[in-house]
Image: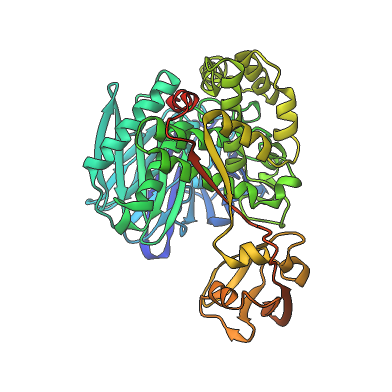
Amino acid sequence: MIHYSFYQKNPASHYIYIDMLVDTITSEKIQLQLPAWRPGRYELGNFAKNIKRVDMFNEKGEVISYTKLNKDLWEVETKNCTSIKITYSYYAAELTAGSCFADTTQMYVNPVHCCMYVVGRTEEEHKIELKIPENYKVACSLKNENNTLTAKDYEELVDSPFIASAGIITDVYKINGINFYLHFNGECKPDFTTIKKDFEAFTKKVIAFWGDFPYDEFHFLFQILPVKFYHGVEHKKNTVIAIGPGYAVNTGVTYENILGVSCHELFHVWNVKTIRPAEMQPYNYTKENYTRTGYVYEGFTTYYGDKLLLASDVFNVQQYFETLQERLTKHFHNIGRYNLSVAHSSWETWLDGYVPGAPYRKTNIYDEGNLIAFMLDVKIMQATANKKTLHDVCVLLYERYGKKEVGYTEQNIVELVNEISGKDFSEFFKDYVYTPSDFETPLREAFDYLGIDFEKQNSKLVNENNYGFKTIDNGNFARVSLVHPYSPAWKAGLFAGDEIMSVDNMMLKTNLNDWLNYFSEKDVVTLTVNSGEQLKTLRMQNDKKGTTWFFQPILKLKGEKRNENFDLWKVF
């Protein structure tokens, strides 16, 4: 058995102190490995950078020597030792759905960040003893006895984050005899009556989609922040969702985001936690797990995370269209779709992670994969006279691979689509999954089949519509986030990262579009720009030809009578 003790000395310091006990040692050396990444985020995290001072002792309390072999692997001299104690502290100052955070109000841990494992002994039972204040509650999917958490092996341990805090509010609902726990931590007043009604509805639909629930319970762990935030991470028997602001958890966009991310993460219980690509079966925590099927494990999940809210009537058609319009916008506003396919973008999340990176370089596996799933879903309906859908492909993935703990390959996905549809989809995968491409033509075909109007509406923002650049808030000024190639802004020399300070000598006060609109009759406007801490003056041509550099996609049902195909598609 491997045993850890977690405690704080000065909670405000954000350090968590960890004592690790390894017993039954029979070799002269052992190796201790800390993971370099966490499942759910396909980039290296290099968590060892947060570890301060590692000391090791034998059973007599004597210091023993060790050598660090690489950034996160320690080799320990254990000759004449039957057990050893390793002590270290972990800096936990980031609060997201996949991080660790400790302060005066809570100890929140994703063990994959900070629990070393003994190489060759990951199959043993692992325990975490929490030395926490008496008024703290613990939210976790692991067995908990007197604040000691037990995992059957290391894999279960690192798949089981926990929150220890005095402020946790918990409720529960039951589906098919399985308890689904709702844990809220942070300043908020959750309306459990409404929340449970909606969660019960989409949970039933997700379970009906797959045919069963593979585990005996499930925990939603909500970290509620005081600011706008949105992040979720999947696990087998739980999920952590960081969201805010806390005062809005029951209303509007924030509540819709809670529903969206919760349904998405629940779908992940099957898709990627149970059904995995061959490259991640099992996970290798020491290095990159390269795969080109991110469009399946993230894209399909994004698609069904939204669609099953519609199928369960938690979302109405308009709410669903708004989520799909967001995906369409991200596709059509991303010039990277012409340069790197969704399959190869999946591979390269390991290279530049989740940051925008070099402009125009890549696509997004979540958004592009969502649209791939939508198009496949409708095309399979067309090929089978509405008798089969992408749902049937997913079920076969679960039956043939997930339940047998066998990883699927890229080719397996194509083969399953061909089997279910009765047609060869190789060209579709070649053209839209493996080749950089614009999806407008196949999307329009899918929308037409379902009786959905797809319109291109001019952007309401003058900078996007007339000049071809996008911005993000940056105090009073506007920071450029993207410039469309060959647009007036591109020709004027404006690029991502530039900060626009004035328009025709009028200083900006969070009102870029107001001034651009005011000068809309002019053929040329002059911008004062901070570019790399140097002031530049740029003359930018006003595109009055009606060119829409960044259009807004608008979806609505055609006619007064709904298309029968749409109603059949909506079921799953």
The N terminus lies in quadrant: top left
Give above or below for 483 relative to 292. below
Q: Position of residue 483 (x, y in %)?
A: 69, 62
Residue 44 appears anywhere in the view: no
Visual colour scheme: rainbow
The C terminus lies in quadrant: top left
Give above or below for 380 relative to 137. above
Say which quarter of the image contains residue 471.
Answer: bottom right
Residue 199 appears anywhere in the view: yes
In this picture, residue 551 sits left or right of residue 532: left
What residue sits 50% from the left and 32% below the top?
155
Nearer to us in this view, 9 or 269: 269
Q: Position of residue 29 (x, y in %)?
A: 62, 37
In this picture, residue 204 sits left or right of residue 537: left
Q: Position of residue 296 (x, y in %)?
A: 59, 31
Say which quarter of the image contains residue 487.
Answer: bottom right
Give above or below for 279 relative to 472. above
What residue sits 46% from the left and 31% below the top?
267
Say which quarter of the image contains residue 427.
Answer: top right
In this picture, residue 379 sits left or right of residue 303: right
